[in-house]
Image: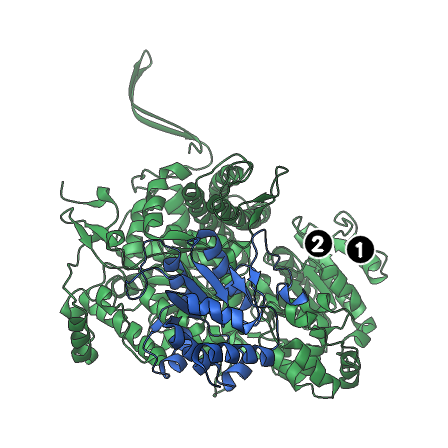
Chain colours: A green, B blue
């Protein structure tokens, strides 16, 4: 993509003289990056299509349509069931891939608008030349940007070129979903990969911009521990709750308090990624309430006096919910105005007065710097007036609500997790609130049950009341998001990861729509950390990991180090910090293996797919953003596992291990095609249970390049987990043992006997690549 | 019929919807007529039903019609403990991916399955797996949801019913196929 005008003249003879080797760039970026530019700087979708198709040949889309119809245009509704086509000609496979692409476009648009807002605001404040410094040991500061755009951003202003590229490409991809456009399901899937790649670029831009300017931890493995949990919120002070993902309005709250000596007079806490980022900004002052599923739980306690919302993953009925408890809501993002009057041009004191006197239902303030003053002043004024709202109903009131129950079971039917709500309410009728309290762990506080209830019972509030002791004890520690992975860390672990001696990198990411509570994520993360995998985490999943204590009263963050090394549990930060996870994989190829990054996507993705044993587990993935984040990993060839609700993304990318022809690579040394087994077996996979996810994750960490020692370590984990849950050796073991030296030494006799019984034969271990152009022998 | 409404709110089906058959005798006949039946079992079987021995009932039914049982996750050990020799340890998504493939000849390589029986999954999860087979499976393959909920994406589904009633139905099916109590 021509991003700027570039003129290169090798030799020009004119009347004025001879000009040699003149290179002129007109535009913002003047590169002094000595690395030669690859073929794919700012690639179009068709330039990487052949790579996508290589992946899609191995990992074919498996569709599970959520709906038989298409209702996107006025031709319809069209019945696409079985092999029917709609009025526009689209078939079911095309439609499913189109919906996935739409979801991913929404995700990318969200991250990109977030990044654009941040970059513009931070340029206004710190200037276009503000340097991008992510920490002394971070030399490859923007691996996604270098790889995808072929630029090495040095200043905030440089990031705008990458944003321009994303916005252009995203428009093309979204256009593909229009009626009468792309009809090939595989081309639609290739576009899904393309927007996924764009997504990681947007994530990276957003996070490096805020790290560089807002004094966040800079790749610090020992980033501070901060408080998390509803019980850690000091309710003896006015409470400001920030919700969303864009940290700028939240920072102005902290700044205003500091500038006005109000540091200890107001409690500032957050939900979702704004909470991550406000604690990165101010670990001493800010606290985290919890992941997004804690939003209504916390509101129903009546505690927040002021709610400042920015963007993404905020309940759209936040104003309604807040009004029930006389809370003040301030919206700050044009993506989420909530119907409030625009008060940005008013004097802060006028806004405060109007809000406190309830002359306006809430205020939209799009100047982040103004938000802090208004929020703090309003919180201090309404706090004494709101004390009567800061309480849960009494036990008697809960019982009284419960007596209205008609036992129609509509609540059970509405619950996405099929929780036994009606039984709990019936028990509450008889004075037993324990079954309501039991629901707390697995409830995601969506309140679908309340909406379904014909007698308008406040079921979530009843659950929260029944769990009030547990809520008060919700006091935990989480390590603040550290941001990027250091180049020095990459150098240390590059070899053991690529050779397979560190069994893998397992990333717990995404939303908290857990089918059976967050505890499962904690169990899985600890299991892999104990097994000396590198565990990385971000977003709501990272919060979940901090919300359970072991028998010594400690959370995982207090037990495991935050270093990117075997046995570490590494919180990189908010959703946008997912770019550091893909970035770490890219940096292994670059920093450790010295592969060229610049505009060299295919080679790097091929390297990662065949050599970096990484897998993502998005156990509660819910959103379109989660879909686009996953898609970015897919294009790099990194598999992603989702929990049961993830099946609603409606298509998986499944390998077929028994199809031998799918699992050949080129041996880069000889050019021969070599069978390497199904490594990794799937690219996108739904697991029904935690046990399944653990076994599959261990398996998906195997790569074609594993050394025998490395494969033995990976097999040890796969076999051990399989035996623990199923009591047997995995049936597919022969596919993963290439030579006898792959066999874990402690299980050698048993496995050799098993392999003999299965007719196993030795396989070659090549220098693997899916790209013919990477073959060195010509 | 209220029992033939989707169990979970907003799971609106259609246009192709399951035949509703809840009479144990008719379900027994369908199972008996299967040439190559396969059970796919999930990990969310109701606790009360587990306490009342539903696993041995399922295994008895499978044994009576010589069915394979595909199962994964924590519940696998319960099935393995029955010593039924056609219990297959395989994740549900991998089974679905293969069942819809016209070239797949089953776990024993002897041919495609003609009746696939689902039981014990989260409602939405089973809904989606059944949808995958409805649209991409062989038309000759019939899917049967034996869960106590109406699953409209199956070829044949039971209606919504409580666990006690469901256990009676399952016991009666077993009895029809094997005789005795």
Q: Quadrant of the N terminus of chain A?
A: top left
Q: Residue furthest top?
A: A15
Q: Position of residue B41 (x, y in %)?
A: 44, 71
- Residue A208 seen from this side: no
Q: Nearer the viewer, residue B68 or A71?
A: B68
Residue A600 lies in quadrant: top left
Q: Numbered disc 2: what chain?
A: A
Q: Secondary structure at mark 1?
A: helix
Q: Provide the residue designation for mark 1.
A: A351
Q: Provide the residue designation for mark 2.
A: A370
Dots 2 and 1 on the same chain: yes
Q: Residues within 10 Å of mark 1 (few under 14, many from 20)?
A: many
- Residue A704 seen from this side: yes
Q: Nearer the viewer, residue A162 or A335?
A: A335
Q: Secondary structure at mark 2?
A: helix
Image side of residue B72 versus residue A369, left or right: left
Relative vertical location of residue A775 with respect to residue A418 in this rendering, above or below: above
Image side of residue A308 versus residue A558, left or right: right
Q: Nearer the viewer, residue B93 or A316?
A: B93
Q: Quadrant of the C terminus of chain A?
A: top left
Q: Position of residue A103 (x, y in %)?
A: 53, 50
Q: Earlier in the sequence, mark 2 or mark 1?
A: 1
Q: Are marks 2 and 1 in contact (CB under 8 Å)?
A: yes
Q: CA distance from mark 2 to mark 1?
A: 10 Å
Q: Position of residue B125 (x, y in %)?
A: 51, 64
């Amino acid at each position: 993509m021509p991003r700027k005008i570039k003129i290169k003249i090798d030799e020009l003879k004119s009347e004025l003289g001879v000009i040699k080797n003149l290179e002129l760039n007109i535009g913002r970026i003047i590169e002094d990056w000595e690395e030669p530019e690859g073929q794919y700087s700012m690639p179009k979708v068709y330039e990487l299509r052949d790579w996508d198709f290589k992946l899609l040949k191995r990992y074919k889309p498996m569709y599970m349509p959520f709906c038989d119809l298409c209702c996107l245009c006025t031709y319809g509704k069209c019945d696409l069931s079985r092999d029917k086509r709609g009025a526009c000609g689209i078939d079911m496979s095309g439609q499913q891939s189109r919906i996935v692409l739409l979801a991913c476009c929404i995700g990318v648009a969200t991250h990109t608008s977030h990044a654009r807002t941040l970059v513009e605001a931070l340029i206004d404040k710190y200037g276009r030349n503000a340097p991008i410094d992510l920490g002394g040991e971070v030399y490859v500061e923007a691996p996604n940007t270098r790889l995808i755009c072929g630029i090495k951003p040095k200043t905030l202003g440089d990031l705008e070129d990458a944003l321009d590229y994303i916005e252009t490409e995203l428009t093309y991809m979204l256009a593909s979903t229009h009626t009468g456009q792309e009809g090939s399901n595989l081309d639609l899937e290739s576009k899904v990969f393309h927007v996924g790649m764009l997504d990681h670029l947007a994530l990276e831009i957003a996070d490096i911009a805020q790290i560089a300017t807002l004094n966040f931890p800079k790749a610090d493995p020992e980033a501070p521990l901060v408080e998390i949990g509803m019980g850690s919120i000091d309710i003896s002070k006015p409470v400001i709750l920030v919700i969303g993902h864009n940290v700028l309005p939240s920072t102005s709250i902290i700044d205003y308090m500091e500038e006005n000596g109000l540091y200890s007079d107001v409690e500032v806490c957050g939900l979702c990624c704004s909470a991550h980022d406000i604690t990165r900004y101010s670990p001493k002052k800010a606290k985290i309430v919890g992941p997004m599923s804690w939003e209504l739980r916390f509101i129903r306690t009546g505690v927040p006096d002021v709610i400042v919302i920015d963007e993404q993953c905020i309940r759209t009925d936040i104003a309604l919910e807040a009004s029930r408890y006389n809370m003040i809501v301030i919206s700050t993002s044009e993506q989420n105005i909530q119907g409030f009057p625009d008060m940005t041009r008013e004097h802060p004191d006028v806004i405060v007065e109007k809000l406190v006197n309830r002359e306006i239902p809430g205020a939209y303030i799009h100047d982040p710097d103004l938000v802090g003053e208004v929020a703090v002043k309003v919180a201090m004024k309404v706090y004494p007036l709101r004390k009567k709202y800061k309480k849960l109903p009494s036990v008697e009131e809960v019982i009284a609500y419960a007596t209205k129950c008609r036992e129609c079971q509509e609540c059970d039917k509405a619950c996405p997790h099929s929780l036994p709500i009606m039984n709990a309410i019936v028990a509450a009728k008889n004075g037993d609130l324990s079954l309501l309290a039991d629901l707390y762990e697995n409830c995601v506080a969506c309140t679908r049950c309340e909406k379904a209830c014909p007698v308008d019972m406040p079921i979530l509030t009843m659950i929260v009341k029944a769990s009030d002791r547990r809520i008060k004890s919700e006091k935990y520690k989480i390590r603040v998001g550290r941001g990027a992975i250091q180049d020095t860390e990459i150098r240390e672990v590059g070899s053991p990861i690529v050779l397979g001696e560190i069994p893998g990198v397992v990333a717990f990411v995404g939303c908290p729509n857990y089918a059976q509570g967050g505890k499962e994520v904690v169990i899985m993360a600890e299991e892999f950390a104990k097994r000396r995998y590198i565990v990385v985490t971000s977003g709501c999943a990272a919060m979940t990991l901090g919300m359970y204590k072991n028998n010594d009263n400690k959370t995982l963050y207090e037990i495991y180090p935050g270093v990117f090394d075997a046995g570490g549990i590494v919180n990189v930060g908010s959703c946008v910090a997912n770019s550091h996870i893909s970035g770490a994989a890219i940096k292994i190829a670059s920093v450790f293996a010295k592969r060229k990054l610049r505009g060299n996507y295919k080679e790097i993705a091929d390297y990662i797919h065949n050599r970096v044993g990484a897998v993502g587990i998005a156990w509660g993935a819910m959103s379109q953003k989660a879909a686009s984040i996953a898609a970015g990993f897919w294009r790099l060839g990194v598999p992603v596992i989702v929990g049961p609700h993830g099946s609603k993304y409606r298509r998986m990318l499944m390998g077929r291990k028994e199809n031998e022809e799918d699992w050949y690579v080129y041996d880069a040394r000889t050019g021969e095609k070599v069978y390497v087994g199904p490594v990794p077996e799937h690219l996108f996979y739904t697991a029904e249970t935690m046990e399944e996810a653990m076994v599959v994750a261990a398996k998906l960490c195997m790569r074609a390049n594993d050394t025998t020692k490395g494969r033995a370590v990976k097999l040890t984990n796969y076999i051990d987990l399989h035996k623990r849950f199923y009591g047997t050796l995995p049936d597919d073991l022969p596919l993963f043992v290439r030579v006898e030296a792959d066999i874990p030494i402690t299980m050698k006799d048993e496995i050799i006997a098993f392999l003999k019984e299965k007719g196993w034969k030795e396989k070659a271990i090549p220098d693997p690549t899916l790209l013919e152009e990477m073959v060195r022998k010509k | 019929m209220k029992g033939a409404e989707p169990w979970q709110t907003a799971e609106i089906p259609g246009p192709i919807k399951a035949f509703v058959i809840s009479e144990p005798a008719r379900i027994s006949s369908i199972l008996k007529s299967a040439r190559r039946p396969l059970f796919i079992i999930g990990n969310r079987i109701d606790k009360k039903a587990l306490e009342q021995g539903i696993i041995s009932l399922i295994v008895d039914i499978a044994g009576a019609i010589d069915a394979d049982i595909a199962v994964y996750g924590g519940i696998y050990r319960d099935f393995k403990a029955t010593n039924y020799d056609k219990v297959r340890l395989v994740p549900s998504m991998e089974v679905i991916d293969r069942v819809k493939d016209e070239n797949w000849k089953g776990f024993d390589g002897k041919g495609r399955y003609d009746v696939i029986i689902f039981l014990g999954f989260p409602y939405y999860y089973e809904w989606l797996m059944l949808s995958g087979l409805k649209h991409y499976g062989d038309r000759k393959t019939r899917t049967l949801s034996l869960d106590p909920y109406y699953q409209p994406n199956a070829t044949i589904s039971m209606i919504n019913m409580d666990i006690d009633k469901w256990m009676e139905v399952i016991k009666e099916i077993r009895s029809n196929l094997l005789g005795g109590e």
